[in-house]
Image (spheres, rainbow, N blue to C red):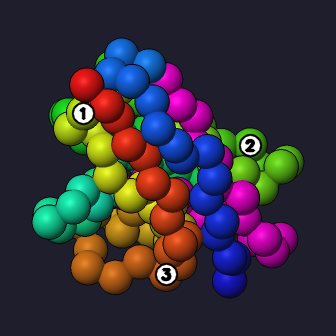
């Protein structure tokens, strides 16, 4: 099983950009589908983006499509989320997640195998 550590969160003005990283430990990173989720204050956690083990297939929530890009580097055991044209409604704690099944990381299952601890993104007006 991998362990996940997110980084790259912070405070940014609306219209700005941030890149989140999720570093994975363990040798089995490439065997996992990976995803990003977020949880805003007072709201439930929601799916943001996901990709399969080699990054060939990507999936996005409608609210971020065209603004966010998910990618992975299996040689570096790292998952990324490039976030452009950020909006105040993107403010949330962002979590990366790993599971062998793509269904899980696109939010179709209640249980995911591994979660990171989260990184806070705050977008000011």
Q: Nearer the viewer, residue 83 or 105?
A: 83
Q: Crowdedness of circle 3 by 10 Å Cα count: few (<14), some, many (20+)?
A: some
Query: What is the x, y in percent for residue 96?
Result: 50, 60
Query: What is the x, y in percent for residue 103?
Result: 34, 64
Distance from Cα at disc 1 to Cα at disc 2: 29 Å
Q: Earlier in the sequence, mark 1 or mark 2?
A: 2
Q: What residue sits 64% from the left and 69% below the top?
A: 4
| Label 3–label 1 contact, CB within 8 A | no
| Label 1–label 2 contact, CB within 8 A | no
Q: What residue sits 77% from the left and 55% below the top?
A: 77
Q: Which residues are magenta?
A: 17-37
Which residue bears the numbered disc 2?
A: 73
Which residue bears the numbered disc 1?
A: 88
Q: Earlier in the sequence, mark 3 or mark 1?
A: 1
Which residue bears the numbered disc 3?
A: 113
Task: Using the rendered image of the protein, determine whether residue 46 is visible from the camera's viewpoint.
Answer: no
């Amino acid at each position: 099983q991998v362990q996940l550590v997110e980084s790259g969160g912070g405070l940014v003005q609306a219209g700005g950009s941030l890149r989140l990283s999720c570093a994975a430990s363990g040798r089995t990173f490439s065997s996992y589908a990976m995803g990003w989720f977020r949880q805003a204050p007072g709201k439930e956690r929601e799916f943001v983006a996901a990709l399969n083990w080699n990054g060939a297939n990507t999936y996005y929530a409608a609210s971020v499509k065209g603004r966010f890009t998910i990618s992975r580097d299996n040689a570096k055991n790292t998952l990324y989320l490039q976030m452009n044209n950020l909006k105040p409604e993107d403010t949330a704690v962002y979590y990366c997640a790993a599971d062998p099944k793509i269904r899980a990381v696109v939010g179709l299952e209640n249980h995911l195998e591994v979660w990171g601890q989260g990184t806070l993104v705050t977008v000011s007006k």
